[in-house]
Image (cartoon, helix red, strand yellow):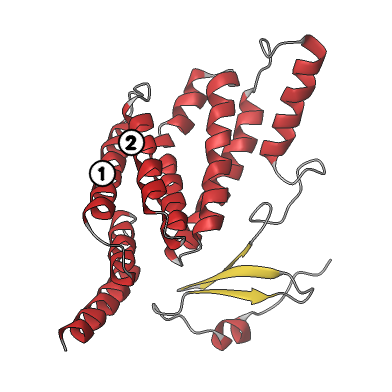
């Protein structure tokens, strides 16, 4: 198959602008895809299934493949003891987790919280599999050091879904549960785990306090998204949110 040629015209049709980096469009076959305009190119993600659209041995995801393997092993042996995820299996799961991370980061930034819940839950399930069945302790450490961050993104997104449904109490319970889970996580002796654990706890506690003490208005939602953008070091998104907050605040002063 011939590779595509010059894509200059495609890039010119969507110039890079910090305020217009993400869009969801219809592909030629009618499915919707997520696109991100970067300074030097365009990234495209499937909205459902694996972000890259690939199948893993005719399964939707590598996670599904290994969940089915585990179920078959338990059916055959009447227990899960002895089931192993070797290093090659681990890399397949880890690489899938990375592309899910790239997608849910964008989804979170544009307020697609239900899809962010789905993708972060997927990565948490990968963590569970690796924690219990990975053959290598180094593989476990490599992945599980980021679990506090994944859980934080999952909990905040799930709380935002509840807030949009005006279920403030449920949102608070979700955040409280995530705080308890992170506080009780077994320690992993890596700088990344220590950093993500502290940062995630601080952010979750701050968000919980914000929900409890204030009425949740559109302005409050923007402020929460601003905090998240700063946490993710997405300073362009943060600048845009600050401008929107400033404009709304001025309107309220009139």
Residue 103 appears in the rendering: no
> Quick check: 89 left or right of 150?
right
The answer to whether 118 is drawn above or below residue 254 in the figure is above
Query: 111 or 2, which lies in front?
Result: 111
Pointers 2 and 1 in contact (C-beta within 8 Å): yes
Q: How many numbered dots are placed on residues in this image? A: 2
Image coords of residue 98 (percent x, y):
54, 46
- Compare residues 66 and 222 and report the one nearer the observer: 222
Say left or right for 93 vs 3.
left
Q: Report which quarter residue 103 is drawn in.
A: bottom right
**Residue 77, image x, y percentages:** 78, 10
Mark 1 residue element? helix
Residue where numbered disc 1 is placed = 205
Q: Is residue 218 above or below residue 74?
A: below
Q: Residue at x 20, y 79 (%)?
A: 249
Left or right of residue 249, residue 185 in this image: right
Is residue 113 in view from this perspective?
yes
Residue bearing mark 2: 179
Residue shown at the point (80%, 17%) measured from the top left: 75
Q: Residues within 10 Å of mark 1 (few under 14, many from 20)?
A: some
The residue at the far left in this view is 253
x then y, percent, for residue 138: 48, 22
Q: Residues within 10 Å of mark 2 (few under 14, many from 20)?
A: many
Q: The N terminus is located in which quarter?
A: bottom right
Label of residue 63 in the image: none
Q: Nearer the viewer, residue 153 or 142?
A: 153
In primary-sequence order, the first of circles 2 and 1 is 2
Classify mark 2: helix, strand or loop. helix
Q: Residue at x 56, y 20 (%)?
A: 132
Image point 62% across, 87% down: which residue? Answer: 9
């Amino acid at each position: 198959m011939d590779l595509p040629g010059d894509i200059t015209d495609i890039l010119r049709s969507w110039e890079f602008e910090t305020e217009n980096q993400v869009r969801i469009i219809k592909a030629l076959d009618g499915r919707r895809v997520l696109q991100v305009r970067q300074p030097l190119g365009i990234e495209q993600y499937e909205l459902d299934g694996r972000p890259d659209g690939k199948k893993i041995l005719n399964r939707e995801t590598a996670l599904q493949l290994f969940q089915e393997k585990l179920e078959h092993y338990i059916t055959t042996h009447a227990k899960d003891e002895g089931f192993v995820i070797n290093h090659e299996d681990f890399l397949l799961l880890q690489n899938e987790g990375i592309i899910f991370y790239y997608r849910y980061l964008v989804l979170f930034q544009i307020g697609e919280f239900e899809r962010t819940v789905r993708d972060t839950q997927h990565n948490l399930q990968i963590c569970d599999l690796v924690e219990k069945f990975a053959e290598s302790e180094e593989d476990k450490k490599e992945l599980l050091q980021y679990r506090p961050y994944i859980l934080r993104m999952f909990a905040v997104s799930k709380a935002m879904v509840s807030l949009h449904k005006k279920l403030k109490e449920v949102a608070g319970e979700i955040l409280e549960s995530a705080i308890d889970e992170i506080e009780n996580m077994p320690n992993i002796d890596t700088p990344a785990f220590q950093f993500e654990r502290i940062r995630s706890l601080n952010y979750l506690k701050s968000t919980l306090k914000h929900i409890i003490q204030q009425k949740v208005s559109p302005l409050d939602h923007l402020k929460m998204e601003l905090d998240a953008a700063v946490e993710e070091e997405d300073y362009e998104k943060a600048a845009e949110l600050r401008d929107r907050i400033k404009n709304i605040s001025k309107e309220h002063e009139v």
